[in-house]
Amino acid sequence: MSEPDSEAAITRREFLIRAGGAGALIAGSVLAGRALWTPEHYLPGFQQERGLHLPSYKIDDPKTLPTLAIAHGQTHEKTINAAIGALGGMERFIEKGDIVVIKPNVAFDRSAALGATTHPDALRAVARLVLAAGAAKILVADNPINSPAGCFLKSGLRAVADELNLSLLYPDSNSFAQIQMEGEILKNWAFFNEPFKHATKVIGLAPCKDHNLCHASMTMKNWYGLLGGRRNQFHQHIHSVVSDFPLMIQPTLVILDGMSVLMKNGPTGGRLSDVKPMGTVVAGTDMVAVDSYGFTNLLERNLDDLTYIHKAHERGLGNKNWKETLYREVQV
Amino acid sequence: MKIRTARRISQLFFFSLFLFLVAVADLRYLKGYPASLFLELDPLVAVATALASHTLYKGMIWSLVLLIPSILLGRIFCNWICPYGILHHFIGWAFGKGRKPDAVRIEANRYRSLYQTKYVFLAALLVAAAFGSVQVGLLDPICLLYRSITTAILPTLNLLLPNSVYIRQAFHVGGWIIGLLLFLLVAMNVVIPRFFCRVICPLGAFLGSMATFSLWRIDRDPKKCVQCDACLKNCEGACDPHTHLRKSECFVCFNCLEDCPCDALSFRFMPSLAREMSTPSVPARRAVLGGLLGFSFFGFARTSGASDRNYNKNVIRPPGAVEEKEFLARCIKCDQCIRVCPTNVLQPALLTAGIEGIWTPILNNKLGYCELNCTLCGQVCPTGAIQRISIEEKTGVGQYAAQGPVRTGTAFYDHGRCLPWSMDTPCLVCQEVCPVSPKAIYSKEVTVTKRDGSKITLGQPYVDPSKCIGCGICEHECPVTDEPAIRVTAIGETRSRERRLLMDGGRSPRNS
């Protein structure tokens, strides 16, 4: 091997590369250090919490039209059509081109007949009305307690979504964003935001159910399924949480399916004998009024016991005295 | 003064300084000493935590002070400053080949391809860090030495010389593993001189990579060189000074300069590139494999669930610790917090916190408890894995009263083991020592009929979870010492929203 000349200085080019490389490494380190340097500490877990605010999905309401409709009938389709018709038809709520979120209650991996989940016939009837009114797209979304795929499949809602080409959204980890509100207890919480990114209208479609802790799960409690995070803490303040929902979301319309009511062992049920046929659908723009009717007339209980209704009413989030509202009751 | 003498003085100084700073990491002596100095100077710690957490915490900016000269001069750190390198240098001289015949020493100091291993480790560690799992502390020499001294050397020293280190003997769970690993790595100098520094050290690999463009290096004058290889006799880095110098391996120990009989070696500014190997000689495919190892480690470890839903109830982190995934992006396992903890409650986890959390600090209330008016662990943490919170922030007083105290967990009773609950015996030590006001532990007075028919009135204790901060002194002082009748678990810790027990964090009355 030939030895290079010891005196051979490095070439000008080599010198520049070498000096440039060293200079660039130093400059890069200093700039990166400056950019990343955090000289202050923070208090973990106590940072300011920020989140999004949902817009209102309510329609401009002509004061002459009813805000609550009660329909009695034999089948989901006819009774729901009658209830919506009594409110002035779905065209009152849905415009051509609307993107509509329908929020069913699919919390449990149960068959429809057990009354623990939104009935597929109810979803079909509502979705058809929404599509007939000109909606461009329907999104069906819920964050169930049991595993999402099983809940949508066994409740029969997936079949309806496939049949009518509705978009079924599962609550995957990218679907959530923090929501911000000044609730009695809810301030900042993980919210199933994905369906609401482009939504223009929101319809809640809830079964009427007994609930072990808060007595009833109807259209207000249905919004529980839009939240994520540590929901198992909600039960520490359940009435406050449920009464915060009408503050969290102002839907276009809520529909309480009282065709078959889960009278006991709620909210899961499990026996057909827990379910009582009531042949009623209640629809309206005020979820507090709808649930007041449901609790007294469908679950057949004393409204005094339903703390969350009174909390919401006292805060002006709805009217628990449904008879004082403009309502229509129709028979199919 | 000969340059080798200057280096030895530097080694003595920095090794002593390191031991001094370890010694003063104690409530009795700490004052304002920069206890974390060596860790804050460590550029690998800085880069790894910056990659993982996207921040350079407080004093970590000092790492530039070491990085910049290393870019210009090469791995001067390894043989002038690094206390672990100095330890290996000394052990190699005392027990290794340092006293063998010249020919043996020359052969032992030739470069071997085994020495590229450290670059593979470095690639793995940096890729894992980029994904958010900081594991550099496993092998970083400063972290490794600090951890070993804290959990193995000092407790052993105090065992031999009672009261020399501690007021009360300290214990460290699994300290024997850390101690034996230290022994093994140090002993390897007998087989391969500077085994750790040459083969394993990821900081050395990092500094070696950074030396690529260094402006100064050892240079051999081929006209004077008689190819006697005497320069290899004391070569610490095995950097081939007798031929093309491997810049990434050279520790700049300057032994070769004085060992050369022909004065052929010198430390020069920008000598010819033809006589050096500028970059580490690690095949790209091996480095990529190292990167894949780092990524795989991250993926396998994270999906094991220990930092997520399957978290262990005993992973109780120190007050001020950041949320668990962020913690894993910051903690370098130096265990300086464990060293400074005045109650011995902080312990190095083995697998309790998952494979990623090995040797990270967790609270063991059997050995100690978290002192209410103490935030020393956060004061010394160099990377902000434990934030430097104040006593006011920790205890939630003054301007922090509205948000309340930092909670590290929640205490739960085991009624079957509790004297007043199951054995008709008065106790309430737990209530006595509960340090918060109002006390998190309250009691209800009951009159019970004992086995012999006589009656006794005693207090049965309860925990108010809205007041409990998880300090663990109740568990520590419980007379049922083998498995206390009240035990703290991690649930309720404020650092993590997902691990709170109460919906409102205990800030409002629990009756709505």
Image (spheres, rainbow, N blue to C red):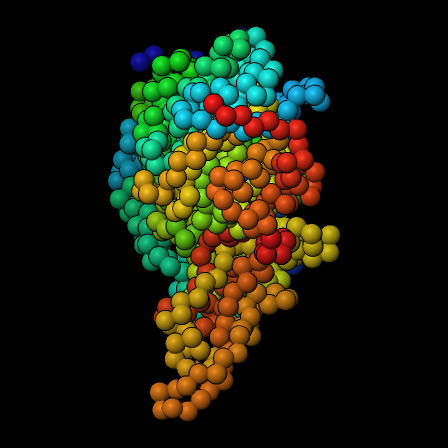
> B27 and B275: which one is in front?
B27
> A119 and B234: which one is in front?
A119
Placement of A75 over or under A180, stated as above or below: above
Q: Is residue A217 left or right of residue B59?
A: left
Number of numbered tags placed on the structure image = 0
Residue A40 is situated, as x and y percent measured from the top left of the image, at: 66, 41
Q: Residue at x 43, y 31 (%)?
A: A279
Q: Residue at x 45, y 40 (%)?
A: A209
Which quarter shows the N terminus of chain B? top right
Q: Residue furthest front?
A: A331
Quarter-wise, where is residue B225 in the image? top left
Q: Residue at x 32, y 54 (%)?
A: B177
Placement of B68 over or under B336, stated as above or below: above
> A165 and B173: which one is in front?
A165
The answer to whether one can see residue A145 in this image is no
Residue A186 is situated, as x and y percent measured from the top left of the image, at: 60, 41
The answer to whether one can see residue A184 in this image is yes
Q: Residue furthest right?
A: B399
Quarter-wise, where is residue B228 in the image? top left
Q: Is residue A204 left or right of residue B287?
A: right
Placement of A187 over or under B279, stated as above or below: below
> B7 and B41: which one is in front?
B41
Residue B259 is situated, as x and y percent measured from the top left of the image, at: 40, 36
Q: Residue at x 39, y 50 (%)?
A: B312
